Amino acid sequence: MGLVFTRKLGHVPWMRVILVCIFCMVEVEPSWGKGVAENSNVVSSFSRPKSVNIGALFTFNSVIGRAAKPAMAAAVDDINSNSSILQGTTLNLIFHDTNCSGFLGTMEALELMAKDVAITIGPQSSGIAHVISNVVNELRIPLLSLATDPNLSSLQYPYFLRAVHSDYFQMNAIADLIVHYGWREVITIFVDDDYGRNGISALGDALAKNRAKISYKAAFPPDASRNDINDLLVQVSLMESRIFIVHVNPDSGLKVFSIAKSLGMISNGYVWIATDWLPSVLDSVPVDPVTMDILQGVLALRHHTKDSHQKYAFTSRWKGLKYVGNSTINSYAFYAYDAVWLAAHALDSFFNQAGNLTFFSDRMINESALNLSSLRIFQGGQQLLQKLLRTNYTGLSGDIQFDSEKNLINPAVDILNIVGTGSNKIGYWSNYSGLSVVSPEILYLKPPNKSSSTQQLSSVIWPGQVTNIPRGWVFPNNGKPLQIAVPNRVSYKEFVSVDKDPQEVQGYCIDIFEAAVKLLPYPVPHKYVLIGDGIRNPDFNNLVHDVAINKYDAAVGDITIVTNRTRIVDFTQPYMESGLVVVAPVRKVKSSAWAFLKPFTLQMWIVTGSFFLLVGFAVWILEHRINSEFRGPPSQQFMTILWREHCQHLGTICASNMAVCGFDYQF
């Protein structure tokens, strides 16, 4: 408005301008006064505010909340005691507890937004994050969330920023693990909420890219009892796959392993892989020996945080921080600490660019029947959001910077093997180079390489204290026996025959099949099904076709391997000669020194001689006027032509004064 008035001064008398200015000041000043009363942060665009509010929205009585609260409080103290950041502006952190409830969490979030916070950190819950992301979009308040749900996208929610790496990358790491060990099917056990469903959906997509799949999705409700989980695990224990991926909440996840141990499912032949929730639990509280005994051989993924002196210094002073209690530090503490510093850096840059903490009411919100008049829109929200996206610094967890898709750069995880009283780090996974025993920070200095030869991990002690890689599947205990088709032959009964009393199948082919089955380290229940009436031999092509369409699981007998059959079924290695031979005539060809002349037929000789004379005649026409050698009696000229042609074909020069033709007439 100042610019508009300045442009009109030349057209308005001075006294009138003064009166208009006084009138504007009288009308505007009450609203300014009201703004200051409601929000002490409303200041001139040319000065920094005395304080700025940011919010923290977590379930503080949880594994993540108990680590995040003291870390964020420590970050605020460090920022306010550092004169180089915010430069005199005090950072106020307002805690609100979601109490593990979607409804209460939403209400707490709305109450927090009513306090004119510039940035909100949290929540950890994916369900609450989905709801709050719609709210912050309307109020233009940036949200730094620790929710890992991959479906929370900045494309749908522009003011949503993830202060931790998405589960999308963690699920890709699990998919690479599955492929690395040669498995093809897994069973997922997950909590049936946004966090669980969307994470498993991302895992399914990652496995599909590697020609693997989820054979069964075992979901249980967030408030599931031990009986519910027990029934679910009994159901999956009867299935074929022995690879289990556990993606549950940290506060209830150990219950799954406790029940699985009681069912004998954490033993030889089984593979258990847990997402980052398990290391968060193990790092947060002292774990008793009984729990560690349950987890022996389990693989787990943990968010990778860069080793640094800053990280070690923070870890060493953890016990002396406020709100710590009995909890120990985990990776979410580092991310929460970095989120507060990220907010401080962005606010500092925002104030340096004359950013103003101004909130204004929206008519649609005020007129709503929901009594939301206390919620106001942050005028500088878009500018502050851009400052957050452009912030680049090194925190406790590593390099803090957002990429073009608004994700933190350099996603990586540690791969742990739970053994003894702790865990062994068997390798790393990064989006840059895949699986490796070398830390990602070293690999970032080299060109990316995801070739199969570079994908390496250290040795693993699997459930049952074995080091051999489990097969990953067995025949299901509740499954039907394999239906093995056997031809009921009339002739050559040495290969396959049927005894009438008792009726059973025997023969050379049957003996080989039974011997092969006994070599397997697991039982293969099967049942022989006779094909044919015993009066005439069955049609073997129809028998193979029935196997191809899964009418039978396999066929055993003297079945000849021919081309049209190999196109629809797989055969074993041949274990006996087929007896089929091909009779073909063999003609003995006599060799001769003149064999090279056989391609030259009479027609070939005639054509060759004609061209020989034609080319020689053309040379004679060009040469006989200027070259004396082409003169004389006709017989002499004819001999000269033949001689010159012969010399040209042999590549020699017979006369020094012979003209060189400008074309190549050799053929």
Image (tube, helix red, strand yellow):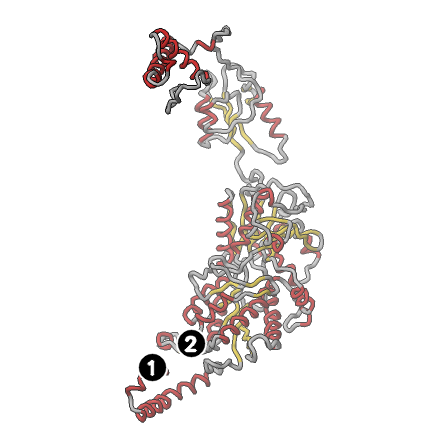
Residue 376's label in the rendered image is 2
Residue 396: numbered disc: none
Q: Nearer the viewer, mark 1 or mark 2?
A: 1
> Which of the 4 quarters of the picture holds residue 662?
top left
332 w.r.t. 375: above or below: above
Q: Amino acid at mark 2?
A: Arg
> Tag 2's secondary structure?
loop
Which is more toward the observer, 174 or 532? 174
The residue that label 1 is drawn on is 4
- Of 590 and 491, nearer the camera is 590
Q: Amino acid at mark 1?
A: Val
Query: Picture coordinates of residue 610 (x, y %)?
Result: 34, 12
Q: CA distance from mark 1 to mark 2?
A: 28 Å
SS at mark 1 in the image: helix
| Image point (67%, 64%), residue name | 309
Compared to residue 533, the image places residue 406 above or below, namely below
Q: Is residue 607 visible?
A: no
- Neighbour tally class for label 1: few under 14, some 14-19, many 20 plus, Cα within 10 Å: few
Rendered-image quadrant of the C terminus: top left
Report whether residue 373 is seen. Answer: yes
Counting from the top left corner in percent of width and height, residue 125 is at 52, 63
Q: Residues within 10 Å of mark 2 (few under 14, many from 20)?
A: many
